[in-house]
Image (cartoon, helix red, strand yellow):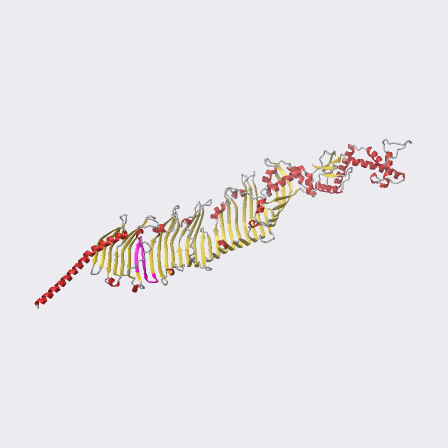
């Protein structure tokens, strides 16, 4: 019995010893052998897989708990630097892994992991060689992981491309459970993650079903005070822009899922998103000052549906920001350098379905108390504009087709002006419409834009507006605009830049009830009103008029088209004038000052109290506009301009009448004396000018009266015309002491050589020349409707004044009456041949009449003047024979001694041959003609005898170049 017990005891001892030995061996192997094996295997396998040196300080393994601890694992990169490391890896494997044929881990802890990431190319990293190739379709390992923790992890990111370093530390991750076992595929995986990215707190929490068909993911992302300048190299910014400061805060919820496990039916939504920027400051590298300063900017409660391509933002808010918008001298803008040029995306293949555009909705948009500074360095002088108190509010803004949101804008312009706009805005189609109000907007800082076209500096100009404005895009994406309301420009002052004098100024210039459209362009205005305006016109000491100074001369003149080339232009290109209608244009309280410093002494004049009205001004109406203007020259002399105008290119019509009364001529001495060589002692000027433009042709009638025009002292002027001015004045003065000038002008206004002022001046000079060279022809134009008063023509052999010549004499008498300073010289004249033959014929006829008078005396009839005797055809031969017999010249006789009867023709010839007309006879005829004319003039009682002189008569021959008959009386004025 005792032996059996002993045997059993020995067996148990052996069993226990075996068990103990097994446990001991298991323990020794588990605690000491397996760690060495695992360490060796890990080093070998990892080194082979990552192709890098792997170092492990120690591996601990608890065979009883199936827990593994790896201490100080280090993977070195090819350059010897640490690629990855961890302080401790704890894995608690479960025995159930054997039965479930899956990796069942109760705990997975990674302490102080470290990864060093190096970006050494645009898409190349120090781990690029570890990325597996596509096409590895090995079956996934099943696992069930509990209590996954990453404790105090760190990632260093070296970007050699951007030459920056980023650090992610204090990385802590907790995942309570993660499993892809079939019974767990629909279970939720909870994630809690926190870290510091470059000292910026980042929090990530969420849950997901990564192994279900829907692959649902829901994450909460919280990034606090991200330092933007550290990441500026990754932003789509130009290298010319520096981000000096800026912090970003992000809070958002992300949800992701698949419908029915289909990759093509993914849903990705960001919701409850909050993004804010604090203390954002941007600076151009080439500039000293910042051009973007935004203390606060936030986007609140945003939802981004990537699948449906919709973005909904509850609120965008920013305040107290400052923007500097600058255009450099080369024409570029500072803000265009913020984002570099974007490459155009490649066109999708035809098989791809076009994606619908993103739909953006902003429920509320708020900009408060912003300041915008504008600076333009490209113009001739810098343009500086400050907009402050900028407040912008929008609600219901959307890109949805056909829908509009509300928007309002208010701002202060350069500390004095105000602008406000309130209305609606739509994106598809682009349209903005609303009410605009502006007051005291001083646009004088913008004068450089005017200076580029004219040499004027705008010292002051305030814009006011009150109306409705619409902006949009029409056909072919061309912009359209319309405005309806009032616009005015007040307190306008402009200064001519070269000589620094005020050129144009006014108190108020208004467009009342204006309807202005662009594309198509239309202008309709009820009234244009200009009040209290003045213009200063100067001719400078070098002879340059203001307009030549003010207008910027083009460096290269365009060649004008010839008439033939212009005809070849299609009508569609010539028709460029938009519809323009202005019911009324009113000007009042105007003044124009004119100073000529070129002449010495200087000439000054002014037109004051200008009032003007233009009504019916329209490019569409066939009727021209009516114009009426009044003013007082030098504040005293009334000036009136009336008529009709139609200045539009297709019609181009004007009928203008200018009237000036009683202007004292001595005021013109500094100006006129330079050209006539005398001062003006006294005289008054009356003007009545009429000009008509029809198409391109100008017709003008210049009616000028100079009353009591008297010259004074002679002036030493190199530019004075070399004509007898005083004689011309005396010639032109009428009995009342008035000089009446009436001469037309004509020309083509499209002809660049045609200048109205030059034409009028030339007309005056030509008039004086006519006074000197052809005074009687000029008198004929003045008093005889163009008749030639230089001479009277007589029938050959006659001193009787004909009917037509009586009319000319009456015109001459009128001219002499109206010109009491003129003296008339009368020169009788005869035609050497014509008058001689006529006198001979008259003598022949008188011989026959003498014979008839003798017969009358024999019959006892009373005597009558020879001129009243008539020879009839039946008695012609009778008295011819008697005259032949009575003639004192040898005749042929018959045998009885009587005068032989000869034929009529022979008698006529013999009588004519023996009639002699001497030069004395011709001179007597010429004298009788002169006497007849003088007698007729004196009988009119309008011309004093002492003003008429008969000068020596003259016999004209063919050698004298006279147009018309040479049997005449010639007149000359002295």
Q: Horizontal and vertical percent for residue 416?
A: 46, 51
- Tell which residue pokes out farthest to the left in this image: 2
State which quadrant residue 275 falls in. bottom left
**186 on left or right of 926:** left
Residue 189 vs residue 215, the one in the foreground: 215
Where residue 854 appears, as percent x and y from the top left, is 87, 37
Q: Quadrant of the N terminus?
A: bottom left
- Quarter of the view holding residue 683: top right
Q: Main secondary structure of the magenta part?
A: strand
Q: Position of residue 327 (x, y in %)?
A: 44, 47
Quarter that holds the C terminus: top right
Q: Residue 940 versus residue 143: which sits nearer the camera?
A: 143
Q: Is residue 941 visible?
A: no
In front: 488, or 361?
Answer: 361
Q: Is residue 257 above or below residue 346?
A: below
In the image, the segment drawn in magenta is 191-217
């Amino acid at each position: 019995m005792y032996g059996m017990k002993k045997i059993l005891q020995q067996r148990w001892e052996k069993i226990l010893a075996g068990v103990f030995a097994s446990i001991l061996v298991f323990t020794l192997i588990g605690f000491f052998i397996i760690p060495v094996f695992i360490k060796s295997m890990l080093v070998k396998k990892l080194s082979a897989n990552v192709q890098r040196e792997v170092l492990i300080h120690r591996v601990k393994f608890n065979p009883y708990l199936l827990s593994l601890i790896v201490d100080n694992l280090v993977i070195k990169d090819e350059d010897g630097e640490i690629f990855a490391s961890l302080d401790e890896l704890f894995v608690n494997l479960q025995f159930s892994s054997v039965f479930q044929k899956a990796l069942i881990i109760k705990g997975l802890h990674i302490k102080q992991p470290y990864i060093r990431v190096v970006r050494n190319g645009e898409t190349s990293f120090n781990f690029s060689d570890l990325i597996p190739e596509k096409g590895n379709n090995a079956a996934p390992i099943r696992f069930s992981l509990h209590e996954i923790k990453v404790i105090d992890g760190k990632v260093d990111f070296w970007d050699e491309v951007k030459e920056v370093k980023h650090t992610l530390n204090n990385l802590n991750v907790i995942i309570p459970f993660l499993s892809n076992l079939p019974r767990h595929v629909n279970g939720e995986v909870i994630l809690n993650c926190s870290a510091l990215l470059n000292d910026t707190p980042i929090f990530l929490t969420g849950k997901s079903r990564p192994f279900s068909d829907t692959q649902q993911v829901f994450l909460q992302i919280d990034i606090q005070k991200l330092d933007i300048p550290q990441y500026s190299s990754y932003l789509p910014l130009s290298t010319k822009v520096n981000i000096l400061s800026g912090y970003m805060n992000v809070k958002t919820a992300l949800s992701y899922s698949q419908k029915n496990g289909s990759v093509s039916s993914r849903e990705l939504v960001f919701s409850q998103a909050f993004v804010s920027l604090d203390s954002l400051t941007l600076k151009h590298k080439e500039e000293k000052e910042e051009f973007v300063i935004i203390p606060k900017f936030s986007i609140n409660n945003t939802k981004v549906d990537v699948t449906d391509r919709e973005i909904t933002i509850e609120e965008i808010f920013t305040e107290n920001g400052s923007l500097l918008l600058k255009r450099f001298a080369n024409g570029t803008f500072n803000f265009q350098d913020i984002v570099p040029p974007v490459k155009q995306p490649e066109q999708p293949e035809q098989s791809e379905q076009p994606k619908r555009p993103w739909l953006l909705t902003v429920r509320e948009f708020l900009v408060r108390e912003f300041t915008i500074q504008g600076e333009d360095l490209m113009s001739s002088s810098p343009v500086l504009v400050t907009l402050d108190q900028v407040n912008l509010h929008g609600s219901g803004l959307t890109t949805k087709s056909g829908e509009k949101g509300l928007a309002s804008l208010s701002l202060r312009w350069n500390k004095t002006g105000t602008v406000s706009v309130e209305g609606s805005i739509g994106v598809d189609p682009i349209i903005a419409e609303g009410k605009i109000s502006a007051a005291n907007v001083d646009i004088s800082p913008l004068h450089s834009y005017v200076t580029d076209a004219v040499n004027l500096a705008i010292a002051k100009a305030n814009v006011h507006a009150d109306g409705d404005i619409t902006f949009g895009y029409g056909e072919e994406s061309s912009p359209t605009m319309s405005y309806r309301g009032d616009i005015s420009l007040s307190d306008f002052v402009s200064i001519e830049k070269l000589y620094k004098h005020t050129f144009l100024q006014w108190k108020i210039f208004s467009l009342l009830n204006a309807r202005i459209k662009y594309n198509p362009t239309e202008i309709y205005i009820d009234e244009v009103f200009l009040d209290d305006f003045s213009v200063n016109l100067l001719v400078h000491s070098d002879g340059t008029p203001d307009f030549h100074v003010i207008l910027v001369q083009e460096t290269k003149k365009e060649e004008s088209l010839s008439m033939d080339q212009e005809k070849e232009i299609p009508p569609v290109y010539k028709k460029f004038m938009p519809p323009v209608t202005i019911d009324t244009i009113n000007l009042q309280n105007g003044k124009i000052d004119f100073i000529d410093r070129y002449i010495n002494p200087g000439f000054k004049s002014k037109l004051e109290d200008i009032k003007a009205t233009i009504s019916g001004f329209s490019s569409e109406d066939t009727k021209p506009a009516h114009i009426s203007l009044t003013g007082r020259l030098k504040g005293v002399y009334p000036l009136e301009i009336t008529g009709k105008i139609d200045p539009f290119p297709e019609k181009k019509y004007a009928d203008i009448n200018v009237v000036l009364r009683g202007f004292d001529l001595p005021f013109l001495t500094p100006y006129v004396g330079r050209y006539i060589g005398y001062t003006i002692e006294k005289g008054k000027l009356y003007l009545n000018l009429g000009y008509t433009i029809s198409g391109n042709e100008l017709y003008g009638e210049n009616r000028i009266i100079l009353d009591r025009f008297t010259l004074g002292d002679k002036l030493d002027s190199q530019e004075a015309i070399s004509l007898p001015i005083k004689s011309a004045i005396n010639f032109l003065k009428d009995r009342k002491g008035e000089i009446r000038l009436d001469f037309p002008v004509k020309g083509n206004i499209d002809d660049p050589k045609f200048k109205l002022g030059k034409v009028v001046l030339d007309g005056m000079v030509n008039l004086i020349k006519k006074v000197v060279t052809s005074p009687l022809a000029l008198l004929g134009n003045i008093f005889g409707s163009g008749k030639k008063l230089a001479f009277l023509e007589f029938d050959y052999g006659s001193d009787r004044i004909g009917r037509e010549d009586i009319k000319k004499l009456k015109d001459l008498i009128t001219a002499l009456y109206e010109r009491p300073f003129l003296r008339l010289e009368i020169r009788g004249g005869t035609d050497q041949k014509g008058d001689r033959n006529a006198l001979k014929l008259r003598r022949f006829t008188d011989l026959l009449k003498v014979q008839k008078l003798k017969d009358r005396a024999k019959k006892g009839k009373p005597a009558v003047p020879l001129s009243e005797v008539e020879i009839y055809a039946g008695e012609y031969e009778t008295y011819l024979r008697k005259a032949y017999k009575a003639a004192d010249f040898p005749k042929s006789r018959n045998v009885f001694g009587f005068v032989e009867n000869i034929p009529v023709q022979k008698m006529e010839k013999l009588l004519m041959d023996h009639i002699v007309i001497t030069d004395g006879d011709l001179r007597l005829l010429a004298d009788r003609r002169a006497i007849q004319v003088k007698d007729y003039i004196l009988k009119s009682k309008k011309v004093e005898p002492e003003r008429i002189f008969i000068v020596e008569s003259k016999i004209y021959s063919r050698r004298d170049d006279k147009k018309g008959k040479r049997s005449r009386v010639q007149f000359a004025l002295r």
